Amino acid sequence: PRINNDGGPAFPRAGFYPDTSRGDRDEQRRLDRLAMKYLAAIDAGDFDALEALWADAEGDPAAVEMYHELNTILAAEEG
């Protein structure tokens, strides 16, 4: 997976997650784990894993939004 200079995932956090100022750290960790799985699947070219992640995201607007944002960021990197 792509990693930024501070060792975290290579995507911006601001506005990327639901409001965590109320202490919703579990949701942030859940989305972090999904993002790492998603990026690993993309890096590996594992389309079955990507399909499963998208299927699991049905009814999960936060995950769907995150996957779209990751795709936007990755497309800009390839630009």
Image (cartoon, rainbow, N blue to C red):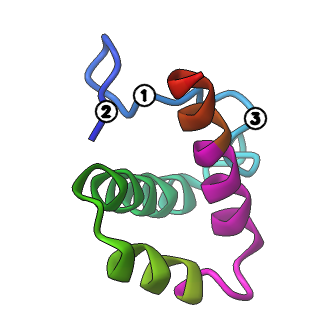
Find disc 2 in the rendering and name its residue.
2
Of labels 2 and 3, earlier in sequence is 2
Question: Which amino acid, mark 1?
Answer: Ala
Q: Residue furthest top?
A: 5
* Label 2 crowd bin: few (<14), some (14–19), many (20+), radius 10 Å: few
Q: Quadrant of the N terminus?
A: top left
Q: Position of residue 20 (x, y in %)?
A: 67, 45
Q: Give the tally of numbered discs.
A: 3
Start-end of magenta stretch = 56-71
Judge whether residue 16 is colored magenta. no
| Rendered residue at 69%/54% (across/down) | 68
Of labels 2 and 1, earlier in sequence is 2
Mark in the foreground, 2 or 3: 2
The dominant secondary structure in magenta is: helix
Find disc 1 in the rendering and name its residue.
10
| Rendered residue at 57%/88% (across/down) | 55
Find disc 3 in the rendering and name its residue.
15
Judge whether residue 61 is colored magenta. yes
Q: Are marks 2 and 1 in contact (CB under 8 Å)?
A: yes
The secondary structure type at the circle numbered 2 is loop
